């Protein structure tokens, strides 16, 4: 007798919609999507059942409401799997995992490891211990933002970001010049924004890093799934060829070509298994052309909003996780090696803004061969309203590039 299960997706962004697609495509099941407010990527879709919970992204609301939902559906299914689609949902699931014991089939990293990954000095200590390259970094406390640049161990330009740009505290903070990631060419530019930040409600740390030369195509992204024993079961590598530039989404990937690199796969797999990682991970890296190293920026305890690129590369991550957590099926680690292009922008944006001619030609070829994917484009969606909303979304993306694009490689 086959088991019944219900996927519960936390969030309503592109990642949430892509996750719902993966479950539906693999098993024909309609997940439950839980969020505080519904965002454009999931509007008017029939792929899931929607439940809005006021304040669900707040810690004091999340735990009791999540437990109510789990207890409501647990008697109706053989298993429940939970997939958080943002850092703050992933963090809350990990922190409250003991309260949900016996109700969720899949597993998450421990609060201790979560803290180590979220705290950059602890994270880079892990990298140092396990032989992973990382950028030179200074962590500044709120009262040290101004003085932090007086004696940096590296030169401008620099990269600056809040310790966690997806934390609720930063998401709700308001100040002039706010971005997800900042690029500063000189000290005066940095101080101007820090003065503005200091007058806001954001009281968290900031991360100041050396700028690793290279444009968007120097980035690398790895998505993986590790079972409850900490063994990596699936891994996919992508080369972003274009990132987004609007202030609120700066640094998010806009176009990715799937890659296969045995050296990166082997090194990252060993690192994840050595630190006892469990569940989904999204790892951002950058190739440093000066010395040929790949430096690790961060590990996010969930799949990325661009993670649908993995499907184009040949792996359905939701199937890998469900086969393991629900059906007890495990196999040797699968490394994605399919050839594909993932897009979150119109094709014309890639044609215009990808500066490398070879990559632009490769993207054009993949489009011509119909080896390209968009998370939000699912032909089976019958809603005209959804079609119009998504059309408007892509027009907005096109306008954002016209307004905000700059060449990072010339910083």
Image (spheres, rainbow, N blue to C red):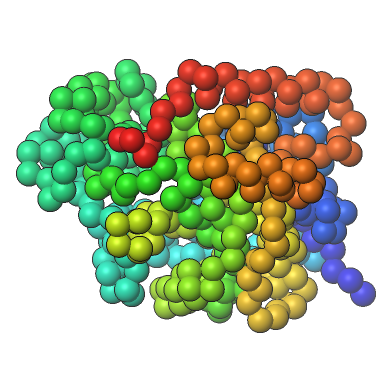
Relative to 335, is 128 on the left or the right? left
Q: Could you say where residue 386 lies in the image, as x and y percent from the top left?
A: 79, 26
Instruction: Decide if residue 75 is in sight here.
Output: no
Name which residue lies at 82% across and 51% down: 24
In-image side of 21 versus 260 (left or right):
right
- In the rendered image, the vertical position of residue 282 relative to residue 57, given as above or below: below
Q: Is residue 57 above or below residue 226?
A: above
Can you see residue 313?
yes
Residue drawn at 46 percent across, 77 percent down: 270
In depth, the one of 121 and 229 nearer the eye is 121
Q: Residue at x 24, y 47 (%)?
A: 210
Q: Above or below — where is 185 with respect to 356? A: above
Counting from the top left corner in percent of width and height, residue 177 is at 33, 21
Which residue is drawn at the image coordinates 30% and 31% (left, top)?
Answer: 202
In percent of width and height, residue 121 lies at: 25, 57
> Could you say which quadrant of the image residue 158 lies in?
top left
Measuring from the top left, give residue 286's x and y in whole percent: 40, 54
- Judging depth in this view, the residue of 318 and 370 nearest the camera is 370
Q: Quadrant of the C terminus?
A: top left
Residue 162 vs residue 257, the one in the foreground: 257
| Residue 258 horizontal side relative to residue 373, left or right | left
- Which quarter of the image is occupied by the N terminus? bottom right
Front residue of this view, candidates 381 and 158: 158
């Amino acid at each position: 007798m086959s088991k019944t299960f219900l996927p519960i997706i936390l969030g309503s962004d592109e990642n949430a919609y892509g996750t719902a697609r993966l479950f539906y495509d693999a098993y024909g099941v309609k997940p439950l999507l839980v969020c505080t407010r519904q965002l454009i990527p999931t509007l008017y879709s029939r792929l899931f059942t929607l439940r809005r919970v006021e304040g669900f992204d707040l810690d004091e609301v999340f735990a009791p409401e999540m437990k109510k939902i789990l207890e409501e559906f647990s008697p109706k299914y053989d298993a429940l799997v939970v997939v958080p689609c943002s850092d703050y949902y992933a963090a809350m699931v990990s922190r409250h995992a003991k309260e949900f014991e016996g109700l969720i089939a899949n597993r998450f990293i421990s609060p201790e490891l979560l803290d180590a990954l979220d705290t950059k000095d602890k994270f880079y200590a892990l990298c140092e211990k396990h032989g992973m390259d990382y950028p030179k970094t200074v962590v500044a406390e709120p009262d040290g933002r101004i003085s932090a640049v007086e004696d940096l161990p590296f030169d401008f330009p620099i990269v600056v970001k809040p310790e966690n740009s997806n934390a609720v505290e930063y998401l709700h903070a308001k100040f002039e010049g706010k971005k997800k990631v900042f690029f500063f060419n000189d000290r005066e530019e940095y101080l101007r924004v820090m003065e503005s930040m200091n007058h806001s409600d954001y009281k968290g740390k900031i991360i100041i890093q050396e700028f690793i030369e290279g444009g968007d195509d120097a980035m690398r992204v790895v998505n993986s799934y590790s079972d409850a024993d900490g063994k990596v079961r699936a891994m996919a590598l992508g080369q972003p060829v274009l990132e987004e530039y609007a202030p609120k989404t700066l640094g998010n990937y806009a176009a990715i070509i799937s890659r296969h690199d045995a050296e990166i796969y082997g090194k990252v797999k060993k690192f994840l298994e050595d630190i006892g990682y469990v569940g989904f991970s999204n790892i951002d890296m950058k190739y440093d052309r000066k010395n040929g190293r790949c430096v690790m920026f961060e590990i996010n305890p969930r799949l990325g909003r661009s993670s649908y690129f993995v499907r184009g590369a040949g792996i359905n991550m939701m199937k890998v996780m469900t086969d393991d957590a629900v059906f007890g099926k495990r196999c040797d680690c699968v490394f994605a090696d399919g050839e594909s292009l993932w897009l979150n922008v119109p094709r014309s944006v890639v044609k215009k803004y990808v500066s490398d001619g070879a990559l632009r030609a490769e993207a054009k070829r993949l489009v011509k061969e119909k080896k390209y994917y968009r998370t939000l484009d699912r032909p089976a969606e019958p809603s005209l309203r959804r079609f119009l909303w998504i059309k408007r979304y892509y027009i907005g993306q096109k306008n954002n590039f016209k307004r905000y694009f700059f060449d990072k490689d010339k910083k």
